[in-house]
Image (cartoon, rainbow, N blue to C red):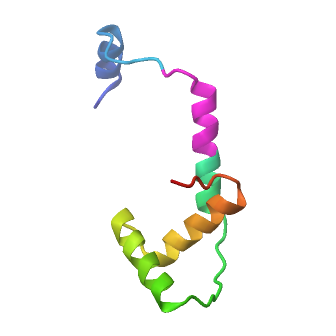
């Protein structure tokens, strides 16, 4: 969209769709943004070599650095959002 006219035309042509549960969705995005902006702190932990290798392998599968992946797992656990498969 380069102009207000194009935006108006796209609305008139029904190119836009309503978002179901807009307020829930916007609240989820707000929480995600706040979480991303929270200051991170560094910790040192000791892992057995096999756990470290598994952590790195799973992080690679997810396309993440293993430190970020470990932090994500810990955050999900602490907030009750970690789901076992």
Q: Nearer the viewer, residue 31 or 10?
A: 31
For image coordinates 50% across by 82% down, the residue present is: 51
Residue displayed at 66% across by 61% down: 77
Q: Which residue is drawn at 37% across and 18% down?
A: 16
Residue 22 at x, y percent in the picture: 57, 25
In which quadrant of the rendered view does residue 42 lie? bottom right
Q: Nearest the camera: 10 or 34? A: 34
Q: In which quarter of the image is residue 82?
A: bottom right
**64 above or below 2?**
below
Quarter containing the N terminus: top left
Residue 11 is left or right of residue 47, and the answer is left
**Is 82 placed above or below 31 here?**
below
Looking at the image, residue 80 sits to the left or right of residue 9; the answer is right
Residue 72 vertical placement versus 85 (above, below): below
* Residue 80 painted magenta: no
- Magenta residues, dominant SS class: helix
Give, as a single range, the part of the protein colored magenta. 19-30
- The residue nearer to you, when weighing 74 against 27, is 74
């Amino acid at each position: 969209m380069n102009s207000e006219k194009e935006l108006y035309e796209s609305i008139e042509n029904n190119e836009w769709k309503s978002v179901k549960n807009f307020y829930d969705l916007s609240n989820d995005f707000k929480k995600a943004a706040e979480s991303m902006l929270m200051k991170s702190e560094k910790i040192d932990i000791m892992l057995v070599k096999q756990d470290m290798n598994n952590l790195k392998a799973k992080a690679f599968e997810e396309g993440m650095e293993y430190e970020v992946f470990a932090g994500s797992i810990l955050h999900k656990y602490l907030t009750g959002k970690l789901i076992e498969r």
